[in-house]
Amino acid sequence: MGWLRPADAAGSGRGRGFDRSRDYREAVARASTPGRCSGAAARAALGALLLALAAPSPAAAAAARGTVLHVYIAAPSLHRDGQSVRVYLPPSYRDADSSARRYPLLILLHGWPGGDGNWLGQGHAAETLDSMIANRSIPEVIALFPNANAHGILGRSLYLSAWNGSFDIQGFLTRDLVAWVDSTLRTRRGPEARALIGLSEGGSAAINLALRHPETFGAAASSSGEFRLSRSFGLKGVLGPEPGATKMLEENSPLRYVGSIAEPARRQVLYFDCGLDEGDWLDQNREFHRVLTGLGIPHTYNEFPGGHGWGYWKIHLRDALLAVTPRMR
């Protein structure tokens, strides 16, 4: 992998739960580049990206490996000049013969505590993409790994936009990020060429955002997600006071609203899985499977041995990729 900007991609995820006795700050710092940078730094990073894309890379093409870059992009929804995003470009992207080719888009969402480096570090996502593209299990894709940390404790947002408008993480993911990649890289536009994939809280968000924005995303995949959100640690600054807090949780809980949007959901590709050792997560995934089945919403649900951690997620990223990409060929 060719890194534009070296960074330690290690990090956490969500683990088996939040341990109040543990100091998570170092893990979050390793996994996530700071969300703020100057406008000049963001422009410099983007300029370096464009220069890198313009340079031929015969060695990378010969090895059939993609390229990973690190950029900062404008994030108006977060009131930030520069938000960290890792970018995976497929093997043929820089080939002269492919200069007019456009590619489908995947956006991979991290868990909490965590950051934009998790999927590439502990999740080995670039290596998985390389191998599955090489054996033609999936088409060549552009993949984005955004930093979705916000203003909650240790960056926690549950992928919910703040009650007081101080940040709009959903707007960043569904508007700012998509607009940036469509204007900067050679993407195929339209929901049929875009998918969200996430783990833990990112898995919950992948399904939730796709269901709420079918005009933008045609597919979503979740590993170890929750589909009925509830109050939990570190979210007071996100949810705000009642009765708005409960309303926000319900409006972003697919188990509570999916019946009202069943028709567009039937046209989407929905995939989710959960480990057999995941307790409450497993119960919610099974319930979501039953609800979707009862509503006649096509989907794929799998259960696999394992628990809530990277040993499970890095293996079953392959299942998610196989599920969301068939319509992208």
Image (cartoon, rainbow, N blue to C red):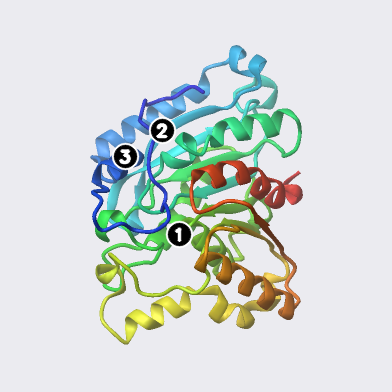
Name the residue carrying label 1. 201
Amino acid type at mark 2: His
Percent across and percent down for residue 309 are 48, 48
* Marked residue nearer the N-terminal end (3 or 2): 3
Which of the pair 241/25 is nearer the observer?
25
Disc 1 secondary structure class:
helix
Q: Are marks 3 and 2 in contact (CB under 8 Å)?
A: yes
Which of the pair 179/7 is nearer the observer?
7
Question: Within the image, what quadrant is residue 60 found in?
Answer: top right
- Cα–Cα span, label 1 and label 2: 23 Å
Question: Within the image, what quadrant is residue 117 found in?
Answer: top left
Q: Are marks 3 and 1 in contact (CB under 8 Å)?
A: no
Compared with residue 260, is residue 79 higher up or lower down, i.e. above or below? Answer: above
Amino acid type at mark 3: Thr
Is residue 184 rendered to the left or right of residue 320?
A: left
Badge nearest the viewer, 3 or 2: 3
Compared with residue 141, is residue 54 higher up or lower down, i.e. above or below? Answer: above
Name the residue carrying label 3. 33
Badge nearest the viewer, 3 or 1: 1
Amino acid type at mark 1: Glu
Compared with residue 112, is residue 226 higher up or lower down, i.e. above or below? Answer: below
Query: What residue is at 25 percent from the left and 51 percent from the top?
Result: 22
Name the residue carrying label 2. 70
- Cα–Cα span, label 3 and label 1: 19 Å
Mark linked to residue 39:
none
Compared with residue 288, is residue 23 higher up or lower down, i.e. above or below? Answer: above
Q: Are marks 1 and 2 in contact (CB under 8 Å)?
A: no
Is residue 264 rendered to the left or right of residue 94?
A: right
